[in-house]
Amino acid sequence: MYTLRISFTLLLLLAPVFLFGQQKMDGLVWAKDVLSWEHFHKKSYTGEGKGIAATYMKMLVEVADSVNDLHKVEVKIYALMIPGLSYVRKGYQTSGTLAHESMHFNILEVFARRLRKELLTMEFDKKTYKKQIERLRRKNWTAVEKAHKQYDKTHRQKEGGHDWWVVDINNSLEELSAYADPVISVVVN
């Protein structure tokens, strides 16, 4: 049983990034090239922004409430896409738009892996490990938001642009491949 469940969501338009509150875990778990227009289930566009598509995402962090005999606690970190809240306007289901939305999902997974890596390199206090993990999650989330905004700002530039992001994010996913499993065990003393 997990007593601490931290979930922040990210509504990604082809414009600024918006942060929403807690949601239950019901979504598409990140996998390479998993996103398709069939995952955008929201039927009607209700004017959330000026975007032609929106990918509703969240990074879910679950921390077990007990430490095992090996002084470890299980932490689950998922990059999720929420199909029921994601949409694309009629007539805009292009490969370019899907590539853009997929890149946002890939960016989220890079930061999920970075957080897993950071947690695995640390040793936590038995009395405060949940607070420590929450502090690191918040720091990570700030970086996620910054990266998404930077991507939206620069992906159309002639120098670099989308191709630079594809190479950079794919390289990051490869470099962090050892941290692809969403379930980790961190040291708690």
Image (cartoon, rainbow, N blue to C red):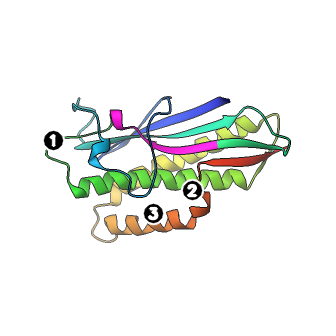
Task: Establish if 3 lies above or below 120.
Answer: above
The label nearer to you, 3 versus 1, is 1
Query: Which residue is the site of mark 3?
Result: 169
- Amino acid type at circle 3 is Ile
10 Å crowding of disc 1: few (<14), some (14-19), many (20+): few
For marks 3 and 2, give the CA distance. 14 Å
- Amino acid type at circle 1 is Lys
The label nearer to you, 3 versus 2, is 2
Q: Earlier in the sequence, mark 3 or mark 1?
A: 1
Q: Which residues are magenta?
A: 76-84
Q: Earlier in the sequence, mark 1 or mark 2?
A: 1
Residue visible at 78% across and 35% down in the picture: 128
For marks 3 and 1, give the CA distance. 29 Å
Res 90 label:
1
Q: Mark 1 and mark 2 in contact? Answer it, CB < 8 Å.
A: no
10 Å crowding of disc 2: few (<14), some (14-19), many (20+): many
Residue 66 at what x, y percent from top left?
77, 33
Q: Secondary structure at mark 2?
A: loop
Res 180 label:
2
Q: Secondary structure at mark 1?
A: loop
Residue lying at the far bottom of the rendered structure: 159
Quadrant of the frame with the N terminus: top right
